[in-house]
Image (cartoon, rainbow, N blue to C red):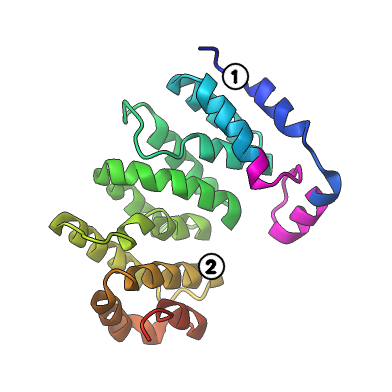
Amino acid sequence: MTDPTPQEALAALIALEDPERAEQMRAYHKVERRYLGLGNPQIDALVKEWRAAASLEGRLVLAAALWDSGIHEAMIAAAKLLTQARIRPDDSGAWALIASWVPGFDGWAVADHACAAGGRRLVADPARLDEVETWTTHENMWTRRAALVMTLPWARLNNPKPADEAIRARILGWAATYADDRDWFIQKAIGWWLRDLSKHDAGLTRAWIDAHGARLKAFARKEAMRHLG
């Protein structure tokens, strides 16, 4: 097994660069970084190759380097390299790497891909929620938002165990502390979490809205209640 090098991976991404689409993406995302203009299918195809060729240690090295490049598509590829239900050993450093990215989040697209990877590591070891809870008071809005986006797996459980129900209550407590935050992305994240929860526990969702919904912006409250009728 030969681990792809960061230089090889970046070269493969840059070889697909579409300058016109890159400028469109820059205007859309409004985050100042380099864009290559790649679509997700292109990134997915490369990530699939790298995952098949790399050891776990190699993937961690590659993911760290791609993220540190600051290139939009490379950062997304970094997150995708670590997005899987089981990583063995789970204490390999994948969670530590993902968590190290969170304080630097600066936009929704890259952050959401990293949160997808991190959510799987949280499900694998819910004790990591103690670290996530520290993000809820972070000065960076995107870091505070990550505490909700990364914990969405608990909103989506069909048959939660008592431990999962306790975790849901804990996360809903975080959401309650966010309810007065006027930032659009925080409000959207609350609405998103509650909307997904309502598909699996309408009663708990209604109870939260009854207690805290008046503090939400109207659009977030509407989002939270979309499936409640």
**Residue 68 visible somewhere in the drawing:** no
Q: Residue at the location (57% across, 57% down)?
A: 108
Examine the structure image and report whether residue 69 is included in the region drawn in magenta: no
Q: Answer yes or no: is residue 16 visible.
A: yes
SS at badge 1: loop
Q: Residue at x 66, y 26 (%)?
A: 9
Residue appearing at x 52%, y 39% in the figure: 80
Element class at badge 2:
helix
Query: Is 176 on the left-hand or right-hand side of 142?
Result: left
Quarter of the image where one finds residue 99: top left
Estimate the spatial distance between the alpha carbons at disc 2 and disc 1, rounded to whole Å. 36 Å
Q: Name the foreground residue: 198 vs 163.
A: 198
Q: Which residue is rendered at x = 69% and y = 58% of the image?
A: 29
Q: Earlier in the sequence, mark 2 or mark 1?
A: 1
What residue range appears in magenta?
Answer: 22-42
Figure check: 147 above or below 51:
below
- Give the position of the C terminus as an image quadrant: bottom left
Figure label count: 2
Q: Position of residue 83 (x, y in %)?
A: 45, 40
* Residue extending furthest toward the left: 162
> Residue 57 location in percent, x, y?
45, 20
Q: Which mark is residue 185?
A: 2
Crowd band around label 1 with a 10 angstrom C-alpha radius: few (<14), some (14–19), many (20+): some
Q: Residues within 10 Å of mark 2 (few under 14, many from 20)?
A: some
Amino acid type indicated by mark 2: Phe
* Residue that label 1 marks: 4
Q: Residue furthest top?
A: 1
